[in-house]
Image: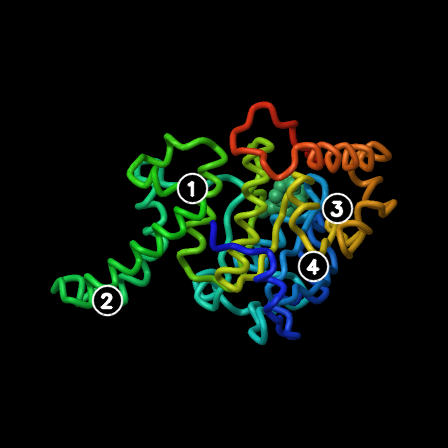
Amino acid sequence: MSAYREDDAAQKTTSSVPVLDLRGVTKTFGGLRAVSDVTFSVPERSIFGLIGPNGAGKTTLFNLITGVYKADSGSIRFRTTDLGPLKPAQIARVGVARTFQNIRLFGQLTVLENVLIACEHKRKAHLLSALLRTELFYRDEEEMKNRALELLAIFDLDKMADEVSTSLSYGNQRRLEIARAMMLDPKLLLLDEPAAGMNYGEAEGLKTQIRWLRDRFELTVVLVEHNMQVVMGVCEDLHVLDHGETIAHGPPELVRKHPKVLAAYLGEDADEALDAEAEAAAHAGQGAEEGDSAAPETTELT
Ligand SMILES: Nc1ncnc2c1ncn2[C@@H]1O[C@H](COP(=O)(O)OP(=O)(O)OP(=O)(O)O)[C@@H](O)[C@H]1O
Ligand SMILES: [Mg+2]
């Protein structure tokens, strides 16, 4: 992490073609409009927040972007590629990776194996060289292992590489899922509630790690999250859904004051909760250590 500098990010330019572009996307389940006419664009190398109360349609949107569901109408583009006709594996190959709201790890495998398994399809491409144990096979293996260890180091998981994944804390399992998604070398990373179950210190660490990933791998990140400490601290732009419909869009400092957003969450209390959170963060400073039990609780607007 020491290589990271905040000003590195500012020096790089971004493309004007959005990495992700949704136009009028609608999805119904039976009589329920889970996603209703949603339109937004995510600029290259931005960290974009998709927020809203429970059942707002956030995970459904991720499932639409990644091809798990097909939209009833509207279009979803990744740069110039129409994702509509593509299958999930094809969408992963063009550069879209995700994590899941419910952790999906292989409990019987080690931390390192859980990360390496993301590359199984790449290994199959070299089936013959794997069978013959050629030099290419070993080089391939070595490269994947190095990348896996680099990613684990970003999340401070490298020392636990040989432990079974179930022995990890909930927060570490969430970060292991991100490391695994990064093995696919994505250009767009969709994170579904990565801070769920994390304490204050872990959530602070996650903010730094997301920024680091964006800068190191020139990524674009879409973050679904209820933890406002993370959302307000890391997102440059927010899109807010409620009952499948867009209720607000813009920079965090404006969205948090939006009357519809306040009403959709906790009414007037939401703004007070956010203020309390910002104050707590200011007092905690940047020295909050992971797992710091003295740190304040995080604010979740659900
Ligand atoms: N496969 C499905 N079949 C039927 N209804 C579904 C399906 N998937 C989602 N829904 C419904 O669509 C709506 C949106 O669900 P979704 O999971 O997208 O919400 P969410 O914003 O991710 O909520 P949360 O913050 O609780 O994760 C909900 O009413 C949900 O019950
Ligand atoms: Mg969800």
C-beta proximity under 8 Å, tags 3 and 4: no
Q: Mark 1 sits on what residue?
A: 156
Marks 2, 4: nearer the viewer: 2
Q: Which residue is mark 3?
A: 243
Q: Residues within 10 Å of mark 3 (few under 14, many from 20)?
A: some
Q: Is mark 2 within 8 Å of ligand 1?
A: no
For marks 3 and 4, give the CA distance.
Answer: 12 Å
Q: Name the residue type under label 3.
A: His
Q: Name the secondary structure under disc 4.
A: strand
Label 2 vs 3, first from the N-terminus: 2
Amino acid type, residue under disc 4 in the picture: Thr
The x and y percentages for residue 187 are 51, 64
Label 1 and label 2: CA atoms lie apart by 31 Å
Q: Residues within 10 Å of mark 2 (few under 14, many from 20)?
A: some
Q: Tell me how far mark 3 sits from mark 1, CA to CA.
A: 37 Å
Q: Secondary structure at mark 1?
A: loop
Picture residue at 48% right of the left edge, 40% below the top: 174
Which kind of residue does numbered mark 2 sit on?
His
The CA distance from mark 2 to mark 3 is 46 Å
Say few, some or many: other residues with alpha carbon within 10 Å of mark 1 (under 14 / 14 to 19 / 20 or more). Answer: some
Q: Residue at x 72, y 40 (%)?
A: 53
